[in-house]
Image (spheres, helix red, strand yellow):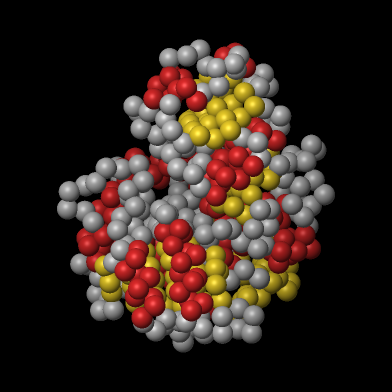
Amino acid sequence: MKNLQNIKNVYFLGIGGIGMSALARYFKFTGRNVAGYDRTPTALTEAMQKEGIDVHFEDDIRNIPKNWNPAETLAVFTPALPDDHSELSWFREKPIGLLKRAKVLGLISNEKSGIAVAGTHGKTTVSTMTATILNETAVGCGAFLGGVSKNFGSNLLLPKDDSPWIVAEADEFDRSFLHLQPQLALITSIDADHLDIYGDRDKIVDAFEKFISQIKPGGKLVIKKGVELNKEKTKAEIFTYALKEEADFSTVNLQLDTSVGCYRFDLKTPDGIIANCKMNYPGLVNVENAVGAAALAFLAGVSANTIKAGIEKYAGVQRRFDVRFRSENLIFIDDYAHHPKELEAVISSVQALYPNRKVTGIFQPHLFTRTRDFAAEFAASLDLLDEAVLLPIYPAREEPIKGITSETIFEKMKLQNKHLLSGEETLELLKNTETEVILTMGAGDIDRMAERIIEVLKSKK
């Protein structure tokens, strides 16, 4: 399938995933019939149902629409589904186009001037910031985001008819990003991750080098300073970005305004300084992300004043340094961090904002393989906290691995004030101990604890 012009019906297997739901909404808003399966109801599936998308939660082929013409139907699946999934097996036996999510994203974005944000950390934030800036321009952009933008209230931004730009996350999981052929690309980081897929870091680097080789002729590549890649693998013009290091794009005169908790800085670009930028969203790591997003916008031809306005208007993404509760004495931040480097970045950013407050971190490890592969690194990152709580591992797509539990990390930690608890026990701990800053971290379902944590904190005011 080389294009989507003749498709009138789209069925999603795993429709509740953040990337899948963005595609489902795109097809619905462009006039197609859309339906799909997911394992569990969520706020996202509920929102899609309200938008007129038929979603069910039982793996049963009887739920698949039978009146759709196979020649006009596309089925989209996520690699997170098990191979013996009944509905997936049904589609494999039918004369219906069956494509991975990443392939479909490529078909949509490659037709336009794609802006792809890659890297083992920070993709969602940088891509959402980029879309926020471009949305301030007359032509705007489309965007497929890995989180729900607070500016747009969605993980999808529909492009204007004359907009040349589509912003998309370039996901390295399952080598998905190799379906993208962007005009502009950015790489935030290349750390060892998804070793269940790649085996070792060298193969991850190989995949990123293949990705940059696919940038369109005349395209441009932005790389975070310090990320090592064989730059001969691409014909794109290369630029660097950094927080404060010497680079093509970086901050100058970076200052924290403690009265409002925001950062102010001048932005260095190849054409000079964009003065007096203001980042209303908290976290030093997000200033660095803003520099990367500004670099992409600059290379897309966005004016200095528009870049400045977009940075200032950025309101964040759900579960990315997401301030869920604030009072005079207490603050609660929820974050998607699930890799040791991400934990280190978000903990350090919180400590920079609140240097004299006790930071209690609650972490839910994601995947048995990641816990096994990075136990020592997770322990070192969690040791940065004043108090740490480890919840049981969230398995996602994996079966348990003998001998691998949250205790695997716990035993390697040097921090004395640490706890190995269930969700209910964690809430009891928060009720009965002194807290100042609460930080929840993880890519599983830890966010479902947020409302109950807020109730506890309100009772302590």
| Residue depicted at 26% across the width and 67% down the height | 420
The image position of residue 452, as x and y in percent, is: 46, 67
The image position of residue 11, as x and y in percent, is: 55, 27
The residue lying toward the viewer, choosing from 330 and 136, is 330
The residue lying toward the viewer, choosing from 183 and 308, is 308
Task: Mark yes or no: residue 63 visible.
Answer: yes
Among the 4 quarters of the image, the one containing residue 73: top right
| Residue depicted at 28% across the width and 74% down the height | 418
The number of callouts visible is 0
* Extreme residue toward the right, this view: 138
Task: Mark yes or no: residue 352 visible.
Answer: no
106 vs 1: above or below: below
Q: Is residue 47 left or right of residue 358?
A: right
The image position of residue 341, as x and y in percent, is: 40, 62
* Extreme residue toward the bottom, this view: 356
* Extreme residue toward the left, this view: 403
| Residue depicted at 74% across the width and 52% down the height | 135
- Quadrant housing the N terminus: top right
| Residue depicted at 51% across the width and 23% down the height | 64
The image position of residue 262, as x and y in percent, is: 63, 75
The residue lying toward the viewer, choosing from 335 and 244, is 335
109 vs 46: above or below: above
